[in-house]
Image: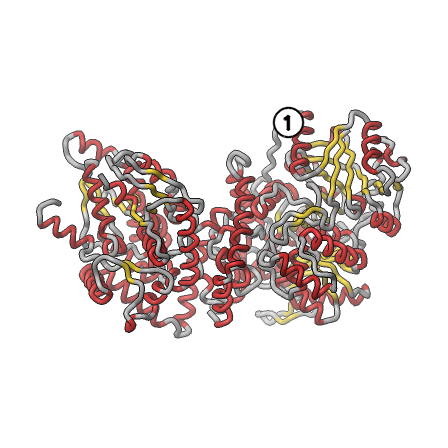
């Protein structure tokens, strides 16, 4: 882990208010979810998960077909499809488009994909003003921070933080009441919606048989973004494809419930092309940008390809005891929590943040709640092994590897194993009671790490096998 | 099940092998002793293959698959002929019953051995309920306890109601559920020493929940969880103790 | 788009590059038909009309939506009149609204076909009145297709949304909707599902209504 990464984690762990905010917010999202997927409320919940997993598996295993079908449908409805290998090509397309339209102001509804390619910074660099319109995203945009959570971007901000932010950045009087803060954002953003030249959205789903983009929000900013400006651009990773509109019966049911405990989010837009003949409003131009940015590489790995099933509900974050301690900014990339832990190494390389797959107790709570049944702990284990292999090739991590080699050899030889136990007891002091501090000469490595947080029992005078042998001698076995 | 009951009919005590796990052997031998005592009390004879050491989980979870295989092969050799293998740990039982297959995908002989062994692995509470078919082991323990649901046991072996049923038959025992019973205690093997700050934080969240339950003792099926929880309780200066389910059931 | 050199030395445009990499990753060839897809899962419960109306209302009310059962089109008109009083309202061109006589209430403006005009009126109106193509009972949802009869803005810009829906349009839920409309894209450029008033909980998880979309919603079933 880098110094700043370690520092961030430490700071988060020591900030009592932040710990409370994270725990409370994720706890609330967990219980809202539980209320709407409980067996008496949604008896076919497990069946839906299985179906979602199967459909995603099918869609991805035939992705080329569905991408081509999607494209031809979009074109048939009067839209255009742009393929982008990476963020640079997305920006190139947008700048070109903005120039053609004389556009300067762009409104954006929430899209993690655009965070992934740092779209806002790149557009700003070229003189375009992108405005986030989801309230949480707007707040973190003003604060020039990354979103804290896939679904709740400003989870870490208190009303007082927001009050400071609004008064500093918007020049309004300091207001700490949440409802009034929302009204302030509403009126500022309304002006932007009405004036914007281009609306950029993400896509929760790309529907292949319809050439449609599905955008779900609770606030209405998704609708504003895709209705008012003359041009609508939807940017989505290629893995967002689902085969049929009818598959939404399963996916929409799972998405809202898993994310926020809502059977459906307030607004679900199913958008297929620009305004048609006779329709009164809607964008005049409709573009869908299909982004690769490494997804084809993930696709090639049969075991880990299931990482691409993710529908970005955030349930795994809410249930992860590690996320609930370290929060969203402790993760090295824009995606945090368990999903972030498995895709970051795949996109950025296992040696980019070699510690990340190990930062989990493998409790499995994530896999239990994933609506598309991604086997997250299994993938974490696979990644751990890959990290070790990469480090071995680079000549790193020698001590640990050697330690495990010796340990494995000892475990094959019961007498050596016993001797090690005996030695530990002798060195640390056996008997009853608790060790609070290591003897200075031994205060290193795992022992020091353990004792920094909790006590360790002394090794009992007799191990189990010694007791068993004594019993045998006494004729009891 | 048939062989054991037939043996009982003829006055022979059925036998079960015990894999105590390395952590019980070295750090919590009382747990192993309690397992033996409870087994004998319900008419089973315990066998302890003395060459046993570890299941290999520490290496497997830390990404060292070769080293895990080395240790796993030893386990498979030691226990290859055992009819029942009782394990007082959800995580070790799950490692052997589920992960060994993954480890030996490329080695057909060991894979076959692992596959054959899998169904013979029994976490202790599951053994009592599903093999020995007893719920009441004649225990008495007048305490107020709370139960910690160990992650592997809960999510990979479906262990949730079983221990609670066993505890409900312990005379004088009162069970108070904690609100975060299913939250991970933060042990996670080498995770606990690679990320001590996070692990310690998770432990403290756990003991806060324990404190709120008002229980004087925490019971669990995994000694590794109890090591973590007890270590945190002790560091916090709390007088709440921990006990493995086997130890509670052995109380008279 | 600039063509970029690729591993084999060939230059490929982004489209060909991505599709090629996708096929290679999957071991598929150009034009290879897809495997058989798992059948779509559509599950429609049995529910009579009365039960559907009751469910629709119960689910809407859970979300702080307001509901009214109108005994007749005239009753619907009276109810709407009572809601809007003398305040400004914009209505869509839905024939049903005209049938109910809602479009000729004094402060209701409708009949717009020009988006600029409609935008200006909707931005200032206090009420937006629409009909709906369907309603979904099990989630309290309105379904609106964009058309010459229904513009998108009317249910979006004003702070209060009133929807007047004939009862036969009420379906059991999303599954039934997708069974009836398996290809929504064939019908319109936009199918919108509205489930209650606009809301957010982005600041300290405190619920606030009326963020960008209408903060108040009234559904009248006739």
Neighbours of disc 1 within 10 Å: few (<14), some (14-19), many (20+): few
On screen, residue C21 versus residue A434, left or right, reads: right
**A75 vs A7: above or below:** above
At x 22%, y 45%, the residue is B34
| Model colouring | secondary structure
**Which residue is identified by label 1?**
C47
On screen, residue A328 versus residue A193, left or right, reads: left
Quarter of the image containing the C terminus of chain A? top left
On screen, residue A115 versus residue C129, left or right, reads: left
At x 66%, y 53%, the residue is A203
For this rendering, which residue is in front, A415 or B30?
Answer: B30
Q: Residue A337 in the image: x percent, y percent?
A: 51, 57
Residue A433 placement: quadrant: bottom left
Q: Residue A369 in the image: x percent, y percent?
A: 50, 47
> Could you tell me which chain the residue with mark 1 belongs to?
C
**Res A66 seen here:** no
For this rendering, which residue is in front, A439 or B120?
Answer: A439
């Amino acid at each position: 882990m880098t110094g700043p990464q370690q520092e961030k984690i430490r700071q988060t762990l020591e900030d009592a208010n932040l710990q409370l905010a994270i725990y409370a917010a994720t706890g609330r999202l967990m219980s809202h979810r539980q209320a709407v997927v409980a067996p008496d409320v949604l008896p076919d919940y497990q069946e839906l998960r299985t179906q979602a997993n199967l459909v995603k598996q099918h869609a991805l295993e035939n992705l080329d077909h569905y991408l081509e079908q999607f494209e031809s449908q979009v074109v048939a409805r009067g839209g255009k499809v742009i393929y982008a290998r990476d963020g640079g090509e997305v920006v190139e397309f947008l700048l070109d488009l903005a120039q053609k339209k004389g556009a300067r102001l762009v409104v954006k509804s929430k899209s993690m994909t655009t965070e992934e390619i740092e779209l806002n910074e790149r557009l700003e660099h070229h003189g375009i003003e992108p405005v986030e319109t989801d309230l949480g995203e707007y707040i973190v945009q003003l604060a020039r921070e990354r979103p804290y959570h896939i679904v709740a971007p400003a989870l870490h901000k208190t009303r007082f933080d927001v009050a400071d932010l609004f008064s500093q950045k918007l020049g309004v009087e300091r207001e700490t009441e949440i409802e009034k803060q929302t009204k302030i954002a509403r009126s500022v953003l309304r002006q932007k919606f009405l004036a914007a030249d281009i609306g950029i959205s993400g896509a929760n789903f790309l529907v292949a048989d319809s050439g449609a983009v599905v955008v779900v929000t609770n606030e209405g900013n998704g609708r504003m973004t895709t209705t008012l400006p003359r041009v609508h651009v939807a940017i989505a990773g290629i893995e967002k494809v689902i085969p049929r509109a009818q598959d939404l019966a399963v996916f929409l049911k799972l998405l809202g419930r898993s994310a926020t405990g809502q059977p459906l989010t307030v607004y679900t837009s199913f958008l297929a092309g620009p305004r048609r003949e006779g329709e009164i409003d809607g964008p005049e131009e409709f573009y869908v940008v299909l982004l690769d940015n490494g997804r084809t590489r993930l696709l090639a790995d049969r075991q880990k390809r299931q990482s691409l099933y993710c529908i970005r509900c955030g349930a795994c974050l809410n249930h992860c005891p590690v996320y609930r301690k370290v929060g969203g900014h402790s993760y090295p990339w824009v995606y945090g929590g368990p999903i972030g832990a498995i895709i970051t190494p795949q996109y950025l390389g296992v040696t980019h943040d070699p510690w990340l797959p190990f930062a989990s107790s493998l409790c499995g709570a994530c896999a239990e709640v994933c609506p598309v049944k991604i086997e997250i702990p299994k993938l974490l284990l696979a990644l751990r092994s890959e990290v070790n292999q990469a480090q071995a090739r680079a000549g790193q991590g020698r001590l640990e590897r050697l330690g495990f080699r010796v340990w494995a050899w000892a475990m094959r030889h019961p007498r050596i194993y016993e001797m090690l136990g005996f030695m530990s007891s002798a060195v640390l002091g056996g008997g009853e009671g608790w060790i609070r501090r290591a003897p200075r000469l031994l205060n290193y490595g795992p022992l020091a790490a353990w004792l920094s947080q909790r006590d360790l029992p002394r090794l009992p005078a007799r191990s189990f096998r010694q007791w068993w042998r004594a019993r045998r001698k006494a004729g009891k076995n | 099940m048939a062989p054991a009951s037939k043996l009982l009919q003829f006055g022979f005590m059925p036998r079960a092998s015990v894999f105590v796990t390395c952590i019980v052997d070295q750090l919590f031998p009382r747990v192993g002793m309690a397992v033996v005592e409870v087994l004998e009390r319900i008419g089973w004879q315990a066998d302890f293959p003395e060459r046993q050491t570890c299941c290999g989980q520490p290496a497997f979870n830390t990404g060292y698959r070769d080293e895990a295989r080395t240790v796993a092969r030893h386990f498979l050799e030691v226990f290859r002929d055992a009819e029942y293998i009782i394990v007082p740990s959800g995580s070790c039982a799950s490692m052997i019953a589920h992960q060994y297959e993954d480890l030996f995908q490329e080695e057909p002989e060991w894979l076959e051995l692992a596959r054959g062994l899998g169904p013979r692995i029994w976490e202790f509470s599951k053994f009592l309920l599903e093999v020995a078919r007893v719920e009441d082991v004649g225990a008495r323990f007048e305490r107020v306890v709370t139960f910690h649901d160990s992650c592997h046991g809960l999510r990979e072996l479906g262990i949730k109601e079983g221990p609670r049923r066993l505890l409900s038959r312990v005379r004088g025992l009162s069970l108070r559920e904690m609100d975060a019973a299913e939250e991970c205690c933060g042990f996670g093997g080498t995770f606990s020493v690679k990320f001590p700050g996070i692990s310690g934080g998770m432990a403290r969240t756990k003991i806060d929940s324990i404190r709120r339950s008002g229980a004087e003792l925490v019971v669990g099926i995994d000694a590794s969880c109890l090591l973590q929880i007890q270590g945190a309780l002790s560091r916090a200066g709390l007088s709440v103790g921990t006990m493995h389910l086997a130890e509670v059931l052995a109380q008279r | 788009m600039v063509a970029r050199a690729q591993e084999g030395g060939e230059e490929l445009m982004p489209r060909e590059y991505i599709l090629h990499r996708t096929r290679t990753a999957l071991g598929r060839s150009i034009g290879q038909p897809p495997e058989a897809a798992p059948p779509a899962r559509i599950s429609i419960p049995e529910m009579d009309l009365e039960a559907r109306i009751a469910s629709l209302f119960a689910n809407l009310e859970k979300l702080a939506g307001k509901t009214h059962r109108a005994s007749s089109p005239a009753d619907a008109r009276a109810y709407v009149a009572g809601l809007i009083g003398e305040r400004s309202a914009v209505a869509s061109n839905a024939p049903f609204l005209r049938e109910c006589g809602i479009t000729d209430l004094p402060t209701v403006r409708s009949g717009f076909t020009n988006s600029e005009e409609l935008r200006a009126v909707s931005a200032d109106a206090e009420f937006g009145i629409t009909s709906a193509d369907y309603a979904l009972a099990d989630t309290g949802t309105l379904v609106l297709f964009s058309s010459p009869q229904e513009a998108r803005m009317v249910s979006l810009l004003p702070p209060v949304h009133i929807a007047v829906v004939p009862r036969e349009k009420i379906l059991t839920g999303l599954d039934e909707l997708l069974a009836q409309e398996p290809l929504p894209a064939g019908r319109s450029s936009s199918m919108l599902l509205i489930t209650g008033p606009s809301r957010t909980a982005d600041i300290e998880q405190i619920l606030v209504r009326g963020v960008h979309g209408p903060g108040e919603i009234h559904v009248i079933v006739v």
